[in-house]
Image (cartoon, helix red, strand yellow):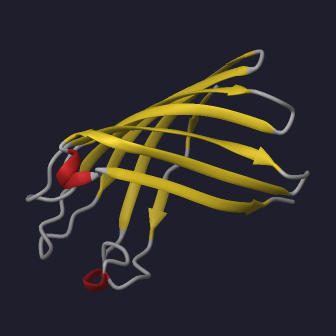
Amino acid sequence: MVGIFPMLELPTGSQPRGLGVGHLRVYLPVWVQKSYGDWTTYGGGGYWLNQNDNLGDKNYWYVGWLLQRKITEKLVLGGEIYHQTAANILGVDSTGFNFGGVYDVDEHNHLLFSAGRGFQNAAEANLYSWYLAWQITY
């Protein structure tokens, strides 16, 4: 499968308080996916239009790739690697990885989790990261 899904990100948070970038951004990605039985792999990348001369932001690339496996009917585990070029004039490129998964509590409730770290310019960009969420679907 091949997909595109342009995204428009509106500035809704306070940039001085670290809640968003404070201006409109557009992401133009292309992703591909292939499944083999219990295995699925997908990834791709795109270009972020991130211009805001007052803040020193600049356009940048983001790419990533994931491999995941269905362990049980309720549990999927996987790992991903990603790379992003600098998003502002003082920034650095960053590369990292995450391991995580999804546990389906039932048809509508899902626990999402992930943990990882950066390995290129990690101290400046992403030394460690983690994610835990509850997803409700209908």
Q: Quadrant of residue 67?
A: top right
Most extreme residue toward the right is 107
* Total marks placed: 0
Residue 60, image x, y percentages: 25, 48
The quarter of the image holding the N terminus is top right
Between residues 46 and 71, which one lies in front from this camera angle?
A: 71
- Give the residue displayed 30% in from the left and 42% down from the top: 118
Dividing the image into 4 quarters, which one contains the C terminus?
A: bottom right
- Residue 38: x %, y % from top left: 76, 20
Residue at position x 35%, y 71% from top?
24
Residue at point 27%, 61% (across, down): 50
Image vertical order of residue 15 relative to residue 108, above or below:
below
Report the front residue among 8 and 131. 131
Q: Is residue 103 above or below residue 76?
A: below
37 with respect to 125 (left or right): right
The x, y position of residue 87, in whole percent, is 22, 55
Determine the residue positioned at 72% across, 54% down: 111
**Corner quadrant of residue 75:** top right
